[in-house]
Amino acid sequence: MVTYIIRRLIGAVAMLIVISMVTFGIFFVVPQWAGATPEALASRYVGRAATPETVALIAERLGFNDPVVVQYGRFVKGLVAGAEYDYGAGVEQCPAPCFGYSFISGQPVWPDLVDRMPVTFSLAIGAAILWVLAGISVGVLSALRRGSFFDRLSMGTALAGVSLPIFFTGMISLVVFSYGLGWTPPGGAWTDFTVNPAQWAYNLLLPWITLAFLFAATYARLTRAGMLETMGEDYIRTARAKGLRENQVVVRHGLRAALTPLLTLFGIDFGLLIGGAVLTETTYTLPGLGQFAILAIRNQDLPQVMGVVLVAAGFVVVASLVVDLLYAVVDPRVRLS
Amino acid sequence: MANTALTQTYNPSTKKGGTLKAAHSADWDSLDPADTYYGYSFNFGRYYWRTLTTYKTGAGPDGNTVVPDLAEGLGQPSPDGKTWTYKIKSGLKFEDGSPITAKDVAYAVARSFDKETFPHGPSYLNELLDWPKDFKGVYKTPDVDYKSAVEATDDTTVVFHLKKPFASMDYVVQMPMTAPVPKDKDTGAKYKEKVVSSGPYKFETNEIGKRFTLVRNDQWDPATDPNRPALPDRIEVQLNVNADDLDNQLISGSIQLDIPGTGMQPAALGKVLPDPALKARTDNPTIPRLWYVSVIPENKPLDNIACRKAVMWAADRVANQTAFGGPVAGGEIATNVMPPPIVGQEKFDLYATPENKGDVEKAKQALAECGQPNGFATTMTFRSDRPREKALAEAMQQALARVGIKLTLKGFPSAAYFSDYAGNVNYVKENGIGLATHGWGSDWPDGYGFMQAIVDSRTIRDAGNYNLSVKNPEVDKLIDQASAELDATARAKLWVEVDKKVMEDASILPVVWAKSLLMRGKGVTNLAYNEGQSMYDYVLLGVE
Amino acid sequence: MTAPLDVSGSAAEAHPESVLVGAGKAIQGRSLTRIAWMRLRRDKIALGGGVVVVLLILVAVFSSPIISLFGHPPLEFHQDQIDQNTLLPKGTFGGMGAEHLLGVEPVNGRDVFSRIVAGAWISLLIGFLATIVSVIIGTVMGVVAGYFGGWVDQIIGRIMDVFLAFPLLVFAIALVGVMPNEGFGLEGDGLRIAMLIFIIGFFSWPSIGRIVRGQTLSLREREFVDAARSLGARHGYILFREVLPNLMAPILVYATLLIPTNILFEAALSFLGVGINPPTPTWGGMLSEAVRFYTLPHFVLFPGLAIFITVLAFNLFGDGLRDAFDPRAH
């Protein structure tokens, strides 16, 4: 068990290294193909009408004059051992993991990321609860009443659900419920849970529902398929023959087996979402990691981009590790080795 | 009534108290006076800083003139125009009660020199003043004496030493580089988190990127400050608010001030303009900003002036204006470079066409003269995250197609537009860029303040250019003449000559002299549009 | 199964390897296809989806004649239809009427109908070709991993993990944003489309790869492969003559289901402003314009519905196709 976790963690670190190298490379190598000099890169990060001297200073300060490999090395060193930041009047310690300082605002990246995590996490957790509850219950009912009107209707809705882009449903829901009827708050509304839980939930209601609608569809369809498959298995027949009541059969034997494969999917979906729900946050202008990512890219702010990409990838890795460990709990046949 | 605040103070009041609620759809570049370069920031910053001079507050043409703020009077130039002396008032105090002296002003100017620490701020003083060779800023070379550039000869006298004569010094020192900073409280790049106030308000809280609150600074003495009535007790600022939501809140009254002051979003325009009650709450000034298309003479066939003229004649000015927001939210059709609010501006039109819709015949003649009778193909760049620039590029493509000029459109992110693409000489050459959307606003309302950065060919370097297309030695010569001219009227005339020369050169296609549709917040008192700020005059505002 | 696209749209493919295993167990390839076709013909909903797909393809292919039939090229301005001050269409319902079936766009008055028709071409082209790219990469990687197993499988498995953990949308935006505008003998829209096809295809191959790998693993142990191997057949022969033909059915099914995902991916990129350069119309691009003019129902609804109908049709058809090939579902 412990060795398994260690091995997985080593694999995860290797993966994050690859991801960070690719991201870093794209930001430097691609502009260099286009013939960008260190000064050209630096002139992105100065005010308007900056002098050539200013640009040269900034190029030096941001380290653009060094080879890309050296710059990457410095980034990794900051992550592992921390870094120092010269803010003019003195030097500040940026403890590990130091993702560096924004090229534009000069603010440290890590606190900014931490600051935005609750938003994305709140969005993901609320939507996840909704979609798991709705998806599984609809899926089970559909499977039990296979071929019924309910089955057809819910499966039709589910298929429609996965076919709707969230930036479309999001916009429509805002126009109708926020700007039109005034039932829900406008885009951009966010209150921290610790400040006011009721307001927190009220502000996130619309994003939760639209996001959950999208995912619930998939889960309903998979639950239904899984249930249909397991309900045809021999052991279910045995359970029925034993004289167990039907809902016991369904819940204790059928559902358990049907849901196990959903766990993997849930792990990845949830991991990806807490790493930044880019489209949802853009549509509802929520100040989470996804919006942060888009802004960082628009501003070509490399330390911020690196930070958000690595954090997002990290969440996926952790989520899938947790899922694999859970398997061992849920399904006694699974051994971790 | 619409446009009331353009000529007079709307709802005048001297009543103190209340909370002014303001919002910003994005974020400041920095709250540090040395590190900021946005018009709204200069305007709003006067709540918590004072500079040597400032624009005269209030509505009307006087708003373009500068008056003393920290200083007792305007600057005293030496006869050769190379030394400027400012006497500052006595009895001035920082928020902690310590006195503001000339030393604090000189120190603030010296610290703003360090562009590695303060990359965003204007660099006028870096270039104008006679800095010692070995001076690298107050942090890196703390022992180097910078008195050859700026010095406090006593507690109330600040002296600037310039490399060459410069007439507009009073305009430069209204910028926040001269806002005093106490040396012992200076924390370099982190100073923006805790700025020490010299104005009527100080920071109560400051959460960078989210919100901040200003409260009264009891050390500020109104007797020293005729410019700021300081009416509200508190000023609350929300940052990164959804732009559409911001407009809706402004309309409904839950906020009273839109800080960037550049006008409303399209969705709100559709609501406000047809509604007489809402429209009555708006002001629609022309601001000193030109939106334009650079016609770049770098690549064939646009290196030929006749081909550039063909572009001038072929453009559909009405379509361009609509693309940029129409006559209300966009601006007035521009016929030359300098916008009307610039002092001494003259309006002229070298490329007048029927109904401003372009003249296909004249364009074809010009094309024939250029040796491209069937037109040519070139590329036009725009900032992809700016919908109006995209619409402008599309309109240009349609209009120029009428005479056989085929445009390929390429959008780039704003953040890299001048560094990597349109303002990068190599990129422009290698990718055959012919046209580029561009916009420019003045730092102060005279010819130099508006034109120099975008038409002087000697400012052009490898990357990060703002002058994309004007490479004309005659223009450069006129700029030198204008800068050296000490008589204001003659100087203004020379800038008009520069403008004419650029238009003859056909390297700038003006689109609109920008207008913004501003909405007066509900319950706001003492509100006036200031021409120097080209926004509402924030320090005048009060609440009911 | 189409993945919910918020972050990347590649998550959902991880699961259903089991669904197709055993497809060739009892029935030979040919008769399987015939049986599947019989099943598909009975599935009215899937057929409905198929018909819509065919119609959409026809619209895309014949977009130019359709547009010229209605007389308003997608790039043509109609500024006489626009209120100069508000920039909104003058007519009611966004200027909808006999002249402009679905109304006109704000600001420039371009015909919404013809832009949607023209947008179909881009959407489907990218949807199809990107899928082909992912099918090729996914099949090669999946077959190699499944057939050779061992460390090869390990490495490819890790690569797939990396792709699954990638914040793909973020990454794609960064990549498209910095792409040059000329290269590979292409320029302008051509290059841009090629880039998008490659990027979308390159990011969505692991879903197909996993399925192919699973299938190959089970095929490898099958008697006829064993037989070929014991007769001394080379790897190449076994792969191309024995394994690949048996993979065709699942690949086809999952390719059909990947098309709508890729269409959504393209729409998302265009929505975020990193898709095809203007003025070429795309549905996602039209929706991103609509954000600024959210008060105009016609401008928001029609491009959104175009995406919805297309993706739904592909999903219905692909779903039916999978059911038809999967005996256990019946």
Image (spheres, grey):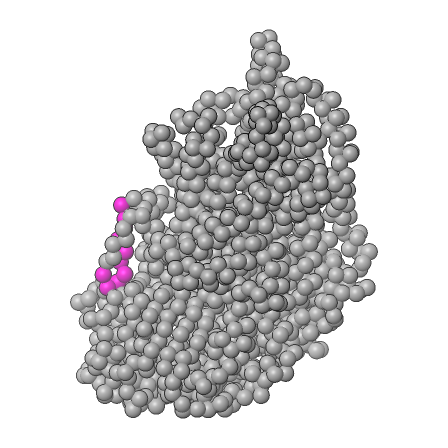
Q: Is residue A87 magenta?
A: yes
Residue at point 66% right, 43% down?
A155
Residue C263 appears in view: no
For this view, does B469 lie left or right of residue C227?
Answer: left
Q: In x, y percent, where is residue A108?
A: 33, 56
Work out which quarter of the rendered image holds the C terminus of chain B and state it: bottom left
For this view, does B318 lie left or right of residue B196?
Answer: right
Q: In x, y percent, where is residue A197?
A: 43, 60
Work out which quarter of the rendered image holds the N terminus of chain B and state it: bottom right
Residue at point 36% right, 82% down?
B233
Residue C301 appears in view: yes
Q: Quadrant of residue B31?
A: bottom left
Q: How many marks?
A: 0
Q: Considering only vertical position in the picture, is C183 above or below A47?
A: above
Magenta segment range? Answer: A81-90
Q: Nearer the viewer, residue C324 or B428?
A: C324
Q: Nearer the viewer, residue C144 or B360?
A: C144
Q: Nearer the viewer, residue B374 or B51?
A: B51
For this view, does A127 lie left or right of residue B315?
Answer: left
Q: In x, y percent, where is residue B69?
A: 33, 86
Residue at point 41% right, 34% down?
A325
